[in-house]
Image (cartoon, rainbow, N blue to C red):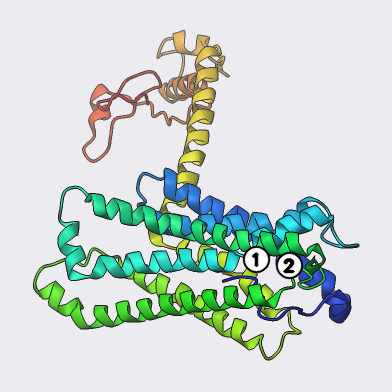
């Protein structure tokens, strides 16, 4: 549902004037930051996290938008996004690949919606109780995953035929942000296909919401689970509504082709997908745990290095006169002896983080209501060094 070429020409750099550069920067920010970086992070989280489980159709939606971002950035990577017309071979390659992007991403979104819708049906609930998925279910999943790319290849073959027949129809002038093919007999059917797919996805989502509202209480009363995360349904509904708004913008271009709004709106869909599905609690929890564990490991490593260095270093010399301890009680005041003993132990556990309390009698170490004080090197009941 991106870059839908309903009419052959939209506003160009001359019509945009001074804002052309800023618009191009914003467009590439969506394509690089949103599609290529953020969605790649989300896919990595889905694939490598042990606590997050997502159906492959959701991961596939992310992959189609990552591919879209790469295709849309070809001119930028070749440093031909501004200035004279790009190299003809590069321009044809981008036009052939980017034209079928709207059908591909729309079919991927439809596959995700269809999977969610089909999972909620009563027959699917009975199937979900089986210990292993059936061969039919596996083949169905493979078909849902392959459908976007088969669609893209089919339209790309047609686009390649048109581009090779008349290379003059391919240029950056028609879309400003990227190279495209100026051939309405090919572009209009592709746009209509995209609109129909988006409409079907919207209808399925609305039907799913209706089923939920009607059957939720009955299922809960019967003790049956829906097999669907309601929060996922809500987020998917928001994303489908965003796509539906994009379809309306696409249709509006029929009456006003001189606008960059359709391309800008389409470029933001990948970022919108990230914003909707990356804010799920389990995703945020996985990221927070990853950051916390990394900081905890760094802190533990730093603490271990500090303790190792302290253990290897010689015991600090006391900052008092040891002769004071050897003198008899008659020669020195008892308080002075206790102060010297306290200073001695403080010197031995310098920088160890251990508080030392010097007691007068052995029984003072077992005062009710508090733990006994131990010097560094004595193992406590829990095996830890104090």
Q: Quadrant of residue 178?
A: bottom right
Q: Position of residue 370 (x, y in %)?
A: 27, 38
Q: Residue at x 52, y 54 (%)?
A: 63
Residue on which the image places disc 2: 180
Instruction: Give the position of the C terminus as an image quadrant.
Output: top left
Q: Quadrant of residue 252?
A: bottom right
Question: Which residue appears farthest toward the front when viewing the image?
Answer: 165
Q: Is residue 308 visible?
A: yes
Q: Residue at x 61, y 59 (%)?
A: 157
Q: Is residue 322 above or below residue 301?
A: above
Q: Is residue 280 left or right of residue 138?
A: right
Mark 1 secondary-structure assignment: loop
* Of 36 and 3, the residue lying toward us: 3
User: Marks 2 and 1, Cα distance to the nearest angstrom?
Assistant: 7 Å
Q: Quadrant of residue 161?
A: bottom right
Mark 2 secondary-structure assignment: strand
Q: Is residue 283 visible?
A: no
Question: Which residue appears farthest toward the right when viewing the image?
Answer: 84
Residue on which the image places disc 1: 99
Give the mark, 2 or 1, whose residue is nearer the N terminus.
Answer: 1
Q: Is residue 262 above or below residue 70?
A: below
Q: Position of residue 50 (x, y in %)?
A: 36, 44
* Of 182 and 361, the residue lying toward us: 182
Q: Residue at x 41, y 70 (%)?
A: 236
Q: Residue at x 74, y 59 (%)?
A: 164
């Amino acid at each position: 549902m991106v870059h839908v070429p309903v009419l052959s020409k939209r506003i160009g750099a001359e019509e945009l004037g001074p804002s052309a550069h800023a618009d191009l920067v914003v467009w590439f920010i969506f394509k690089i930051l949103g599609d290529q970086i953020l969605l790649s992070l989300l896919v990595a989280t889905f694939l490598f996290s042990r606590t997050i489980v997502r159906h492959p159709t959701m991961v596939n939606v992310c992959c189609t938008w990552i591919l879209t971002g790469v295709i849309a950035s070809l001119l930028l990577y070749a440093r031909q996004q501004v200035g004279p017309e790009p190299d003809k071979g590069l321009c044809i390659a981008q036009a052939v690949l980017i034209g079928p992007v709207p059908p591909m991403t729309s079919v991927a979104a439809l596959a995700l919606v269809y999977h969610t819708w089909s999972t909620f049906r009563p027959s699917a609930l009975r199937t979900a109780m089986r210990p292993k998925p059936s061969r039919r279910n596996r083949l169905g999943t493979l078909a849902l995953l392959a459908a976007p790319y088969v669609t893209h290849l089919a339209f790309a073959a047609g686009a390649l035929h048109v581009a090779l027949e008349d290379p003059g129809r391919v240029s950056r002038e028609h879309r400003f942000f990227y190279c495209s093919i100026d051939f309405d007999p090919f572009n209009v059917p592709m746009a209509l296909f995209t609109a129909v797919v988006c409409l079907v996805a919207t209808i399925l989502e609305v039907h799913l919401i209706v089923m939920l509202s009607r059957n939720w209480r009955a299922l809960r009363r019967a003790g049956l689970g829906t097999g669907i995360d309601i929060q996922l349904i809500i987020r998917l509904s928001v994303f489908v509504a965003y796509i539906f708004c994009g379809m309306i913008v696409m249709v509006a271009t029929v009456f006003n082709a001189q606008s960059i709004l359709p391309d800008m709106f389409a470029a933001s869909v990948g970022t919108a997908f990230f914003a909707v599905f990356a804010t799920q609690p389990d995703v945020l929890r996985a990221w927070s745990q990853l950051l916390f564990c990394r900081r905890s490991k760094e802190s533990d490593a730093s603490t271990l290095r500090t303790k190792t260095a302290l253990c290897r270093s010689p015991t600090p010399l006391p900052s008092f006169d040891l002769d004071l301890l050897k003198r008899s009680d008659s020669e020195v005041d008892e308080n002075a002896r206790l102060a010297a003993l306290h200073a001695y132990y403080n010197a031995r556990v310098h920088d160890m983080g251990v508080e030392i309390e010097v007691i007068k009698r052995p029984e003072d170490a077992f005062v009710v209501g508090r733990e006994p004080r131990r010097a560094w090197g004595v193992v406590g009941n829990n095996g830890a060094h104090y």
